[in-house]
Amino acid sequence: QFSYANISPTRIMGVSGTLAAIGEYEKGVLDGYGLNKYIFVPSVYGESNFHFDKAGDGIFFESSKSNFYHKISAEIVAATKSTRAVIVFFRDRSKLNEFVGTATYRQLGRHKSLLTEDMRPREKDFVINKAATAGQITLSTAVFGRGTDFFCKDDSVEKNGGVHIIQVRSPMQLQILLK
């Protein structure tokens, strides 16, 4: 085990799962640091199972907050009944708290956890490590949607379609959507 910071490299290398979606602005920033050569290497994890829903499927617009919260809950229940884990990303803590304050949230059962920036590191690690377990519901702020490795070790989750991700807002960048 070693740290890249300690090896004094003559070349700076980095790893990103979203390099193909990098924008011109980001390329300019990287170029400012002398990073201007990109090599795409296949993932050590194999082919991605990621796929976009068919046109129109999976994208919902609701007419009221009540309907919105009911739809989120219905999606969570459907996925957990299929022996999947669910991670829901809210724009920020206030939006997450709004949902947590609803009756539909309280009806989701006991296997739910919150993941927010103000948690202690050990608490965050605990929630992240169990997030991809069958039946687990994790409600998180959007900041954890990038750079957090939710690793699934649960075969039943994998066999039933993987972790179900719900974004309660549209991502502004393609990199976020792909991640």
Image: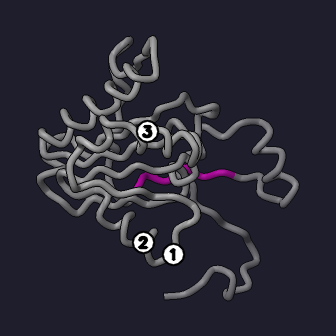
Q: Position of residue 82 (x, y in %)?
A: 12, 39
Among the two numbered marks 3 and 2 on one chain, the one whose residue lies closer to the N terminus: 3
Relative vertical location of residue 3 with respect to residue 158 in this rendering, above or below:
below
Alpha carbon of mark 3 to alpha carbon of mark 1: how far? 24 Å
Asked whether residue 34 is drawn in magenta, I would say: no
What residue range appears in magenta?
38-43
Please, what secondary structure does the residue beneath circle 1 have?
helix
Q: How is the image coloured?
A: one colour
Residue placed under numbered mark 3 in the picture = 99
Residue name at image x 82 percent, y 50 percent: 29
> Relative to residue 36, is residue 123 depicted above or below?
below
Residue at the disc numbered 2: 125
The amino acid marked with disc number 2 is Asp
Q: Residues within 10 Å of mark 2 (few under 14, many from 20)?
A: some
Provide residue 83's location: percent of width, then percent of height: 13, 46
Front one among 169 and 54: 169
Q: Residue furthest right?
A: 32
- Residue type indicated by callout 3: Phe
Magenta stretch prevailing secondary structure? loop
